[in-house]
Amino acid sequence: MLAQQYGPLQGKMLQIMDENGVILQTDLVPDRQDEAWLESYMTMLKTRSADNKALQLQRQGRMLTYAPNTGQEAAQVGSAAAMAEGDWLVPAFRELGAWLTRGVDLERVYLYWYGNELGSKFADGVRVLPISVPIGSQFQHAVGIAMASNIKGEDDVTVAYIGDGGTSIGDFSEALNFAGVFNAPVVFIIQNNQYAISVSRQKQTKAETLVQKAVAAGIPGILVDGNDLMAMYAATKEAIDRARDGGGPTLIEAYTYRLGAHTTSDDPTKYREDEEVEKWRAKDPVKRMKAYLIAKGIWSEEEDVRLIEQYDEEALEIFRKVEATGETELEDIFKYHFAEMPEHLQEQYDEYVQYLKEVE
């Protein structure tokens, strides 16, 4: 089992593919068709195109604050691709690749970052919770969903994401503890991109790794090269299968890097050196997977260029549709918190309606 070979106390990190797209451990390559790997790679490309376009649009003042994903595509797509149709995905706010993999359409994502409440309403059958900006609270929700699956006798597994900074929040430890005690079918994924906004991983915790926090919770854990699509898929698939078979929760640390800013309100040059960024740019998950596919003869540079152009055009077209919806109606802020508006919100809403009548 991978969790035993690369567990929290083993001092090793699971890596199947190196930085040049060369397979290092053929015996660990997941049993998956080339077409499936190509599909995941295309989702990674779509993620990066959509990410770049969102950043450009925000800089033009056409979108609200945005959280870039560049550099973390493999950690997101690889883990989400390992999920079964009925499984639940519980995100934080930097999981664009996972959203696209699990059936959230880009229009919804852009609506959210545009400030439209409908950006949190996904299509029927898409088992993805809305974006969670409060740090760590989504882990509690994930455990609750997983416990409900057990109680209802269902075999669904919940996969939840958090950043390295979130591991310092109480919700993180509480969620791991509850999941372990109640043997909840949940897989926790830490996207360790080395920075919690401007605070480096080294200044965040004295723990040698983040995955070793699984030891205190009494659950399995595994450290994975988060820029390796195959490794992320393999580790997550094993954890999901174990959870589905009644083996309980797993903690995965995806060791990756945020190549861009924390959000568009952040200036990363204030707290990290360009040399560090360039070192990680050489480990780009998109480049290494492209190299692998080209070497296999199932992809080419020409196809890559054409697809990127296509995704760029599609992203802009989708955003223009979002932009055409106009500014968000203030009343929407009141509508979508509860099935029935509680008294204190109703009072505020009535005040708003009265104000509108007075200014007409």
Image: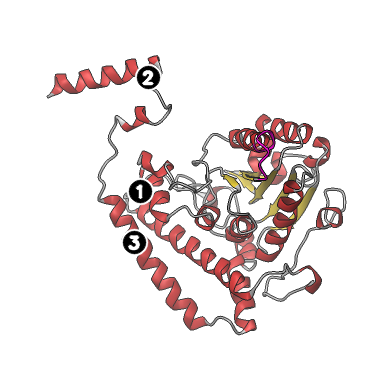
In the rendered image, which residue does mark 1 sit on?
63
N-terminal label among 2 and 1? 1
In the rendered image, which residue does mark 2 sit on?
345
Q: In which quarter of the image is the N terminus?
A: bottom right
Looking at the rendered structure, the secondary structure element under dot 1 is: loop
Residue numbers of the magenta segment: 149-155
Q: Residue at x 76, y 46 (%)?
A: 211
> Nearer the observer, disc 3 or disc 2?
2
Place residue 314 in its image quadrant.
bottom left
Looking at the rendered structure, the secondary structure element under dot 2 is: helix
Amino acid on which disc 1 is placed: Met
Task: Please count the marks in the image.
Answer: 3
Quick one: 150 or 214, which is closer to the camera?
150
N-terminal label among 3 and 2? 3
In the rendered image, which residue does mark 3 sit on?
316
3 with respect to 322 (left or right): right
Quick one: 117 or 316, which is closer to the camera?
117
Amino acid on which disc 3 is placed: Leu
Q: Marks 2/1: CA distance?
A: 27 Å
x then y, percent, for residue 250: 75, 45
- Residue 3 lies within the magenta run: no
